[in-house]
Each structure stands twice: as C-alpha cells, then as structure tokens.
Amino acid sequence: MEEYRVLDRYQCILFDGTEHYCSASSACEHCLTKVHRNKKGDITKTTYHHQALTAVMAHYDHKEVFPVACEPIVRQDGETKNDCELNASKRLLPVVRQMLPAYELLGVFDGLHPNGLMIRLLASLQMRYVIGIQEGYVLIQGRWIEGPKCPSNPTMGSTKGTLRYCQMAQFIDPKRATSGYPNQLF
C-alpha cells in the first residue's frame, strides 16, 4: 500500500455511487424504483435498480484500483422512499476508517458532499478530503479563502478550463448563523 500513497503521506480513497442492476420489467424486494414521466407528467414507465456507494484506493500512477468497502443504497423506510448516496456515505465512512485505522486517509468526493454535516463527520474520523464544488454552488453559503490558481488546466476529455482550489474554505453553518453563534471553519 506504500506505493499508493499520494502527497507522500495519504492513502487516497475515492468515493462514488454506482448502479449495478437496472430493469424495466424485473424487480426484487430490495430494488430502488424510479418513475419516469413525460412532459405532461404522465407516468411512462417504472425502472428498478440497485445502487451502491463504493470506496476504492487509487493512485494516479497506477491503473489498478483496490476496492476497500461498499455500502448499498437502499430504501430508507424499507418500503417506498429511496435512500441516497449522501446517507450511504454517512454509513460507509466510519467503516472505511475502522478498516484502515493506521493510515492517513484522503477522501475524494463529488459535488453531492459539500455540506457541514459531511465535513464535520470527515473531521471526526480524522480524514482529509477533496470535494468537488462547482463555482456558484448555492446549497451552501461559503466564502473562499483566496488560494493559488492553476494558470491553465490540462485537457480532460474534451473539456478545458481553469482549475481553482484552496486549502481551506469557510463554510457558513446556517443553523449557527441564525442562532447568534459565530460562523465556523469546518
């Protein structure tokens, strides 16, 4: 696992959701459901699927990734309400930390995870993190603490752009902001 260290320090764990079964005709008692509607709002079909949140160890110099853990995304109430990737990550993160207690972990997440609860959970598990956030993301209020910018981003697929990053962002916790507590760094 030493050769999979990034930044000479961390084991990089990528977290992402995946769908591993989908059907419009065959379902089991554990299937999630998705109702498809046309522009008028009429139901056109229902699909049944299984999803999971996966955690894999990866390194940019190696083609292979190593599965670490997997958490099913299930119906929350056991009957009708579908679970989500964010809830599955709340269950999966402590499992990953428990499996790799001696390692410094760097979790990499997509844009579904930038919220105060997730950041506090990561901090409590002593995990560093990289979370993708699109410019202008409005579900959280935040102030970027100015950091360096890459002058140009290498071509990724067919997309070019400027990569902007910071080592720390200050996120405003709306519950504390409205109750008179000062904003905190998460």
Image: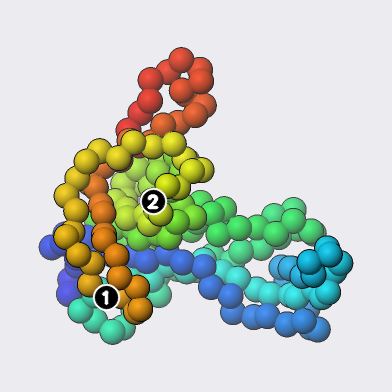
Q: Amino acid at mark 1?
A: Thr
Q: Amino acid at mark 2?
A: Glu
Task: Find out whether the residues at labels 2 and 1 contact each other: C-beta distance under 8 Å.
Answer: no
Image quarter where the C terminus lies is top left
Label 2: element kind: loop
Image-based side of 123 in relation to 24, left or right:
left
How many marks on residues?
Answer: 2
Q: Name the mark on residue 135.
A: 2
Q: Is residue 133 above or below residue 29?
A: above
Residue at the spot of label 1: 155
Considering depth in this image, is 66 or 137 the residue closer to the camera?
A: 137
Q: CA distance from mark 2 to mark 1?
A: 19 Å
- Residue 88: quadrant of the picture: bottom right
Considering depth in this image, is 112 or 28 the residue closer to the camera?
A: 112
Q: Is residue 84 above or below residue 34?
A: above
Considering depth in this image, is 173 or 155 the residue closer to the camera?
A: 155
Residue lying at the far right of the rendered structure: 42
Counting from the top left corner in percent of width and height, residue 114 is at 43, 48
Q: Name the mark on residue 24.
A: none
Label 1: element kind: loop
Considering depth in this image, is 186 or 9 the residue closer to the camera?
A: 186
- Residue 145: quadrant of the picture: top left
Mark with earlier residue (2, 1): 2
Residue drawn at point x = 46 percent, y = 66 percent: 16
Q: Is residue 54 above or below residue 127?
A: below
Counting from the top left corner in percent of width and height, residue 93 is at 44, 55
Residue drawn at point x = 59 percent, y = 66 percent: 72
